[in-house]
């Protein structure tokens, strides 16, 4: 055994999961429930965004309470481009990632000089600044936000307004980015990020440029969140300042904690459970937040490694 | 193998508010020398290490490694130039295995230390080098244990292993024997002796038996000043050193 940190790839479960995700819309059409294709797209997008936050919190030890502002940066970038007629996803996706990454670079350069609770507060402060900037800018629609006349297209005669086509585009992006995230975490940079989470003083003392490594992680997470934001803009064909609100950052953090901080599929599981619970509990009761709160409490108390860590905890 | 680097420290000063922790301290470590830095509690020995390693910035003074001024470089750049420090309180990666701990320190000096693609586990050379270091510090049989599960003595040796694995050849060792029993202590002394000649070492240590066994030269730090430097016998006989250790009234 060389490494306990290496995130392996078990071929069979991975194949089953991917196959299930590929077949899901077909199955939903077969049982005449196309509405859930949109819900599934939403879950996938949040799985990506929550995973990017998990990279920061779980693997990088950077507890950011401002992640929603990178989502917002990507979403508004995509919205402005599509409204301006530049409505190709091959353009809006990288542009949104660039926007999220650039904003993360600016915020990170300042925030990463602090640690612990100060880091939480300063990321929150920056995110709230971004929120108020968006609210007060008339070109971005102020309180009302912006609507998108259509979703960004993919060319090749594909119609993004078809929910099934959009789902597959989202699935492709999310699978690709999750594969990339795994590769990153197993590579030297990912290993260094996790070591800094454990002991930043020692990392500097054995010769790693700690600040630069953390900044790189912060920018990568911001870029992924920005890309997720552009997918959200397409999904809803609408963007609003609420995307950037601090409660949104809080919700993303809840997803990560629920799913498993520092577990590879933590963000995915957390997003799925939270969004599906909200969806289906809202049919039964108006007090969905109470139910979600109780589940979160149970997870924190009984399964501190989150749902992703649960089976290992049970197996022990 | 080229000669290990030497270190020259001149007029080093550090104040914390009104307290002067290091006050115009100067000393030199010759290439290949094991130079011990001793002094009563609170003399500023650890602060001295902090300043030379780059963990804190000096208010004044020059730090010259192998002819190059390094006083303005951040800590990781000083490591890249071949100067690494160990910690008085073991500072390891508790969640990583012993092997992964050392592999990290070796990764730090590889050209791909922050690469984003090729998995670490595919870089066999990293782990081969790490195993060699572990054999040197006597932890070869413990490589798959997580560092958090090591005994205190083993952790002290991993601490030294991490410092050596950086490839640095001027080591600042901050009380490597702290808290060790006689057996473990003897092991670490033997380990340090095996470094002699290959690396230059500035050793801060309270265990006087070990210091007098190992050191080529000794400097004495009192109230942040290096009051004496010399061979062990000369230091033992120095009246000013005796006064510093026994107190003013006894002199």
Image (spheres, coloured by chain):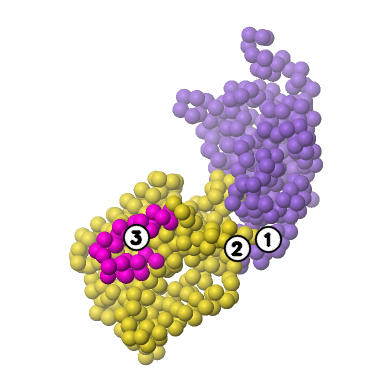
Which chain does the residue under circle 2 lie in? Answer: A
Residue linked to disc 3: A292
Number of numbered discs on residues: 3
- Mark closest to the chain's N terminus, 3 or 2: 2
Q: Is residue A106 visible?
A: no
Q: Is residue A20 visible?
A: yes
Q: Main secondary structure of the magenta part?
A: helix
Instruction: Give neighbour class at mark 1: few <14, some 14-19, many 20+ (Cα, 10 Å).
Output: some
Q: CA distance from mark 3 to mark 1?
A: 40 Å
Query: Of circles 3 and 1, which is in front?
Result: 3
Magenta-drawn stretch contains A292: yes
Q: Check the image and report above or below for B7 versus A15.
A: above
In yellow, which chain?
A
Q: Nearer the viewer, residue B170 or A61?
A: A61
Labels 1 & 2 near each other (Cβ < 8 A): yes
Q: Residues within 10 Å of mark 3 (few under 14, many from 20)?
A: some
Image coordinates of residue A129 in percent, x first then y, are 29, 54
For discs 3 and 2, the disc positioned in front in the rendered view? 3
Is A139 in front, or is B137?
A: B137
Find chain B in the image and tell me its colour: purple
Q: Is residue A43 magenta?
A: no
**In this picture, which residue range is highlighted in magenta?**
A273-300
Q: Which residue is mark 2?
A: A6
């Amino acid at each position: 055994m060389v490494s306990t940190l290496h995130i392996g790839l078990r071929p069979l479960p991975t194949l089953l999961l991917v196959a299930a995700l590929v077949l899901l819309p077909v199955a939903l059409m077969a049982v005449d429930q196309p509405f859930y294709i949109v819900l599934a797209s939403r879950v996938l997008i949040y799985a990506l965004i929550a995973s990017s936050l998990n990279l920061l919190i779980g693997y990088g030890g950077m507890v950011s309470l401002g992640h929603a502002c990178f989502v917002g940066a990507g979403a508004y970038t995509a919205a402005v481009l599509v409204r301006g007629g530049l409505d190709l996803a091959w353009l809006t996706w990288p542009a949104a990632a660039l926007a999220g990454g650039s904003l993360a670079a600016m915020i990170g350069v300042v925030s990463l000089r602090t640690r612990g609770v100060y880091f939480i507060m300063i990321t929150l402060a920056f995110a709230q600044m971004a929120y108020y900037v968006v609210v007060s800018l008339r070109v971005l629609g102020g309180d009302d936000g912006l609507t998108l006349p259509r979703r960004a297209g993919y060319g090749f005669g594909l119609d993004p307004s078809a929910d099934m086509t959009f789902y597959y585009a989202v699935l492709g992006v999310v699978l690709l980015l999750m594969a990339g995230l795994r590769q990153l975490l197993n590579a030297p940079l990912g290993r260094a990020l996790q070591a800094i989470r454990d002991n930043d003083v020692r990392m500097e003392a054995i010769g790693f440029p700690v600040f630069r490594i953390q900044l790189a992680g912060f920018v990568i997470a911001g870029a992924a969140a920005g890309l997720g934001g552009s997918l959200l803009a397409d999904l809803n064909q609408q963007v609003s300042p609420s995307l950037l609100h601090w409660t949104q950052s809080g919700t993303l953090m809840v997803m990560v904690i629920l799913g498993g901080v520092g577990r590879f599929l933590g963000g995915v599981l957390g997003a799925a459970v939270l969004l599906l619970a909200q969806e289906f509990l809202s049919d039964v009761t108006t007090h969905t937040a109470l139910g979600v709160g109780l589940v979160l409490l149970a997870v924190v108390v009984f399964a501190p490694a989150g749902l992703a860590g649960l089976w290992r905890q049970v197996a022990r | 193998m080229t000669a290990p680097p030497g270190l020259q420290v001149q007029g080093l000063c550090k104040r914390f508010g009104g307290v002067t922790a290091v006050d115009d301290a100067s000393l030199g470590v010759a290439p290949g020398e094991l130079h011990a830095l001793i002094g009563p509690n609170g003399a500023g020995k650890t602060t001295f290490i902090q300043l030379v390693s780059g963990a804190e910035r000096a208010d004044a003074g020059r730090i010259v490694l192998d002819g190059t001024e390094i006083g303005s470089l951040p800590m990781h750049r000083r490591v890249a130039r071949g100067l690494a420090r160990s910690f008085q309180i073991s500072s390891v990666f508790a969640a990583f295995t012993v092997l992964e701990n050392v592999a990290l320190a070796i990764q730090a000096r590889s050209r791909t230390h922050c690469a984003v693609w090729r998995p670490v586990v595919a870089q066999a050379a990293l782990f081969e080098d790490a195993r060699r270091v572990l054999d040197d510090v006597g932890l070869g049989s413990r490589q798959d244990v997580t560092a958090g599960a090591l005994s205190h003595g083993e952790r002290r040796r991993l601490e030294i292993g991490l410092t050596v694995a950086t490839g640095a050849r001027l080591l600042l060792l901050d009380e490597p024997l702290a808290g060790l029993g006689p057996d473990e202590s003897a092991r670490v002394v033997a380990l340090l002796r095996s470094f002699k000649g290959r690396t230059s070492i500035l050793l801060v240590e309270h265990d006087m038996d070990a210091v007098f066994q190992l050191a080529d030269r000794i400097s004495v730090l009192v109230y942040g000043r290096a009051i004496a430097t010399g061979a062990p016998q000369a230091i033992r006989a120095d009246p000013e050193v005796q006064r510093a250790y026994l107190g003013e009234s006894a002199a």
